[in-house]
Amino acid sequence: MRIDKQKLYTLKDERNQALEAADAALDAGNMEEYEAKLEKVKGYNVQIESVEKLLREQERFVGQEPGTSGGPGLEREGQEDGYAKAVKSFADAARSGFRVAKAAGDMMQEGVDADGGYAVPQDIVTRIISLRDSKESLLSEVRVIPVTTKSGRRTLKKRGQHTGFATVAEAAKYGKAATPQFTTVSYDIEKRGGYLPVTNELMEDSDSNIAAVAEEWLGDEARVTANKEIMTIVATNDSTDLTDLDGILKAWVGLGSTFRATSKLLTNDDGLLWLGTLKDTNGRQLLTPNPAEPKQLQLCVGPYILPVKTYDNDTMPSTGTKIPMILGDLMEGIAYWDRRQFTIKVSDVASVGELNAFEQDLTIWRGSLRDDCTSWDTEAWVNGYIDTAAAAAASVAAEAEEGA
């Protein structure tokens, strides 16, 4: 039997929870509970070390079972077999209306989520995540953290400033050095959902086509949902009117050397158009392709060259004439907590908006996913914008002044 890496992730998450409980007991002065929790942590460490060793051996001898020739091809074949079984199981569940049986006493069985929905098999979840991540989204800009529990917290070290050593006279006492600054970030997984109407004829299609419809739908919805959550967290920083190129320079310098080296300018298609109109005194455009990587853009602002990444207006919407101009390193600023869990419920009699499943011979799928999005370090980005209406008015005024 193969060791699943998920077992390792679960053990590490449980160890982190035990550490947090030990820390809380220590703060409360309950030394007996503290010692008990510490022993539990040590036990988890032993288990984690054992599983890691098994995983390493498993990777060395993958596929080399008695009577086989071994090799990585067998591992891929096994993975494909697992996915094929998941597709068949999913399609069969879809044809039966994602009904799931419960044992006596109403105990939940495998495939049943806490809210009674059908839990999508993990092999299909993996495909959904791959589809989600294969398309351009803001998830590539932030820190994505897979989690296995509904809530928890992580302790992180800030990009703190070191104060250096103080001058010490002969035979004098050394001063206390500044200690690193830490902060705790908590997450609480929430359920988010939406609807997909499908024709009843889909149930007569092949297993793979039924699974493909669900994978594409859930993958796209997961990506768009994450984009909205990330933009919501971005907006928790006060919005800054950058006004013009000088304002962009001021915000960039304001990030400080702590973040500037890993930062970029994020904007949408409206922003791309506005940046494309900027020119220097010799009429040369300030927004140009990066010579080393022509597909990437860069903006010349004073003594700095800013990497520029653009997204479509649906991903990063403008507000009226205000165009988003986010400067910073969102990888250091925002955390996306990914539970990697999807559930589905269906109805052939429900009404959603103008859709009536019974009258239109449809089946409405209701999908749910679990995730959370939180700030990680609010100093890592500037929530800026350019008001094109104000910028245009300022340009007209300047031209009128020059003409006078």
Image: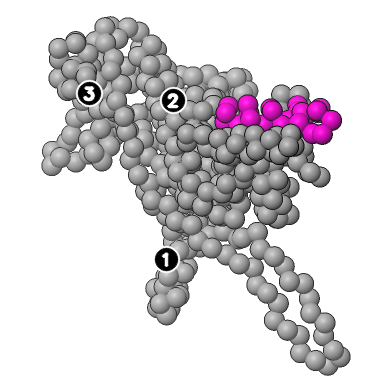
User: Which residue is found at the position 63% from the left and 30% from the top?
Assistant: 274
User: Which residue is found at the position 67% from the left and 44% from the top?
Assistant: 248
With 246 as the anchor, is 213 left or right in this view? left
Q: Is 340 part of what is drawn in magenta?
A: no
With 163 as the anchor, is 51 left or right in this view? left
User: Which residue is found at the position 51% from the left and 34% from the top?
Assistant: 321
User: Which residue is found at the position 71% from the left and 31% from the top?
Assistant: 278
Who is closer to the viewer here, 207 or 264? 264
State whether residue 178 appears in this view: yes
Examine the rendered structure and indicate whether residue 330 appears above or below residue 366.
Answer: below
Residue stretch in magenta: 266-291
Q: Label 3 belongs to which residue? A: 353
Pointer 3: residues within 10 angstroms few (<14), some, or many (20+)?
A: few
Disc 2 residue type? Asp
Examine the rendered structure and indicate whether residue 47 appears above or below residue 191.
Answer: below
Q: Position of residue 99 (x, y in %)?
A: 21, 25
Who is closer to the viewer here, 205 or 10? 205
Q: Label 1 belongs to which residue? A: 21
Who is closer to the viewer here, 323 or 230? 323
- Describe the element under mark 1 as helix, strand or loop: helix
Query: In the rendered image, which quarter is residue 34 located in?
Result: bottom left
Q: Position of residue 396 (x, y in %)?
A: 64, 34
Who is closer to the viewer here, 64 or 5? 5
Disc 1 residue type? Ala
Q: Nearer the viewer, mark 1 or mark 2?
A: 2
Pointer 2: residues within 10 angstroms few (<14), some, or many (20+)?
A: some
Q: Is 286 part of what is drawn in magenta?
A: yes
Q: Label 2 belongs to which residue? A: 220
